[in-house]
Structure formats: C-alpha cells, structure tokens
Image (tube, helix red, strand yellow):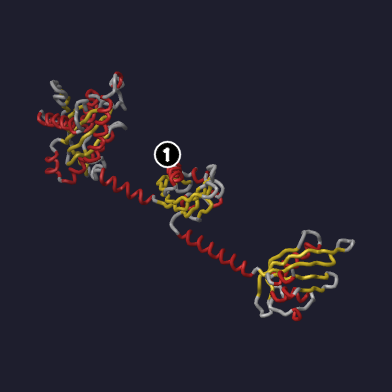
Amino acid sequence: MAQAIAGSGTGIWDRNIATGEIRYSQGWAELLGYRPDEVSNRIEDSYDRVHPDDLAYVQATMQAHFEGRSPGYEVEHRLRCKDGAYKWVLSRGRAIERDAAGRPLRMVGTTTDITSMRLLAEELRTSRDLIANLTNEIPGLVFQYRQAADGAACLSYASMRIADIFELLPRQVATTVAPLEARIHPEDLDLYRATRAASAADLAPWHCTFRVLLPVHGLRWRKIDAHPVRQKDGGILWHGLVVDVTEHKRVEQELKDLACIDHLTQLPNRRAFAERLDEAFQGVSRAATCQGDCYAAGGEGDDSRAAVLMIDIDHFKIINDTYGHTVGDAVIRHFATMLRTTLRVTDSAGRLGGEEFAACLPGADLAQAELFARRLRRRVAANPAIVRGRAIDFTVSIGISDITAWDTHAGDPLARADMALYSAKERGRNRVEIAAGRAPGLRHDRAAS
C-alpha cells in the first residue's frame, strides 16, 4: 500500500499537534526532491516551505478544522522543493484524536502533486481567454445555440458582442432565449423561428435575415448563419454568427430606389409604374373569374376594377425654351408634388419620361377617375410653379381609360388612355378625355374641361 502511494505523486504525513512534531513518508520527501533524512520534523519548517502568498490561507484552513468549523482540512497551495522551485499540491487531513475538551491532538493527511493539473487548468484558462478575446474582436455575435429535446433553448455561449447585436448580456440568455426573441421585430419573429425549425428538421445550415427593435438603437437589421449538430440527448447545438447588416440593407434599398425612382420627381419611374399597373391588371383579371357579387363590391380596394390616367404638361417645350431647363425641371417637380398629394393611399403614379406622367387608381371606375382627373387639372391650373420668385403658369391634359376584363395585358388600357390624352391635346389642351372604344362594338367619348 505504501509503495503504491509512493509511486502516485502523493505523500503521507502524521502530525503531533501538541508537540509540533510532524513525520513524513518517503513518498512525501521524494515529492519535493528530498531524501527522507533531509526533511525536518518541525512544524515550523513545514510552514517555511509553504509559499508566502499561500501561508495565511493554509494556516486559517487548518485552524478552522482544529476548531471544529470544518469536517476536514483541504487546501491547494504551493510548496517549495529542494531545488527552490515551487510545486502546486493538494493537502488533505483530519484530526483523528482529540482530548476531552475537543482539542485536536493528532492529525494525519496526504499531500498530492497537482502541478501538472494546475498547469493544464491554466492553459485551458489561457485558451479560453484567447478564444473569448478573438471572438470578441469579430464584428458580430459568435454563439452556441442549444435546443434541448423538449424544445427549451438557450445560448450556451455568447461573445460580448451580444451587447452590440441585441443590446443584451451573455448571462441574460444563458438559460433562455426569451430576452433575445423579445428583441426581434414582431413581423419577422415567425420567419426567424421557421428557419430555425427547418434547420433543425434537416440538420441544414440556418440562414435568416431579420429586423430587431433595440431599446437604444431602434430598428436594425441582423443576419444569422449557423450550422447544427445533433446531440446524443436528442437536442441540437448550433454554432454560428450574427452580424449587423443594417448598412448593407440601406445601400440595397438605395440601389433599389435608384432603379425604381425617378430622380427629378421622386415618383416611381416607368419600369416601377409598369409593375404597379400590372398588379392592378392582374387584380382585375382575377376578379373577372369570380361569380356573382365579385363585381358588385365596388369602392376603394375593389380588385374588380381600376382606372389608368395618362397626363402631359401642356406646352412644356415652350416653357423650356422660354425660361430654360432649370425652370422646366422646377415645373415638373411642382406638378409631381401636386399629383402625389392628390392620390389616395391605394393609388400610384409615375413619371414615364419628359413631361409625361401616368397614374393608376385601383378600385376606381371611369366616373371616379374622371372626378380625380378634374380635381387634379383644376389644382394645376390654380397653382403655378414659383421659381426664383416668379410664377410660372401651366396646365395639363389628361386621358383616361379603365382596365377591362377583355384586356390581354396591362399595356392595353395604357394605350387607350394615351389615345385619349392625344385627343385632349387635339381638342385644345387643359382638358380631360375618356377613351373611346373601351370594348368591342362600344364607343365611349367624353370630355371634361
């Protein structure tokens, strides 16, 4: 038994508390590099080998056991070896004899070399600190998302960047993801959960771009990329990264706007207006397949009908030639503002090019579209553009058509409205004309000034 202990890096000691004498096993002496005859049996010499920074703690722990405040003596500390170097040891002991008053008389124990364990622990701490420092430098949240078999979830690891990404602390999500999900925009929460569920079902990468509402920074965009691993207990562990893509989304929207918005007027350009007109056309086409009361609904938001207007600024070339292109641009912007502020929320308008504009009025019939056109024409005639303190009077001509069930594509009603616009120009300008020939065998001419 003694030989087995001697080869294990553990030594035995036996202390006479009353006399201050302490005896050590051969293994204990060898642990510190001594021969047995080189080790003093005085307790004072034993304390002298304890590292100065550890001595008070060692003595206090020993005293607590002597006084009965702890069932045993156990402490990690450093001991000086024969060569002057220090080893980390784990000392354990217990008083095995006490007098009638309970005072300790004899104590036995062991001392185990734990230097390699302490070095390993220190290396692990260093590695952990290095990983933490590295992940904290990554411009995003490095995380482990743990989902138990019963569905309970938490972030078992979250880098400190969680403070930037979600305005949370790691400890707030260490046991539940509820605080994190509370930050996700309500309209995006279902998407966030659905993409995670799909990833869990197929063990496929988890990708999701979503909005968050933060207490300090408000609305922001986030993108998550993570890879799942099935755990032995049936749960899933994702390792991933969440980054801030707000600026990317802003630039993306700007590029989209540049592709869809007319720079001068900030109205939709020809392509964007064509898309909205096509949406209205598709709505009428779908409604045409309905039965009975589909057409009887009527009113704003009714997909069964829609009207299209073509609008042109009268004598715009004369305005440009007389006042210059700067004034011409100001007139176009002024008209665009009046057009935009006359539209309903459900309506849309766009600049098709030059002084030519178009509008689409979903849910409107020809009579309602005519009222809108008259109101717009009167507003324009009564509100000249003010450029450098000078009033520039101008008027518009407007052609109207409705979208019909027999139209084959969105360009059909637009072409009819364009012909009605041409008719308004031919009949003196500053007029509203309704398209003729809206259906086979039907002619519908109407003018309003």
* Of the pair 372 and 115, the residue shown nearer to us: 115
Q: Residue furthest right?
A: 100
Relative placement, left or right, of 188 versus 426 is right
Query: Which x, y percent locates residue 345?
Result: 32, 32
Q: Residue furthest top?
A: 292
Relative placement, left or right, of 68 versus 266 is right
* Of the pair 393 and 205, the residue shown nearer to us: 205
In the picture, residue 123 is in which quadrant? Answer: bottom right
**What residue is at 77 percent from the left and 59 percent from the top?**
71
Residue 277 position (above or below residue 288):
below
Query: Which x, y percent locates residue 336?
Result: 24, 38
* Of the pair 270 and 101, the residue shown nearer to us: 101
**What residue is at 30 percent from the left and 31 percent from the top?**
344
Quadrant location, the N terminus = bottom right
Is label 1 in a helix, a strand or a loop?
Answer: helix
Residue 229 position (above or below residue 61):
above
Query: Which x, y percent locates residue 66?
Result: 81, 63
Relative placement, left or right, of 286 versus 439 is right
In the picture, residue 64 is in which quadrant? Answer: bottom right
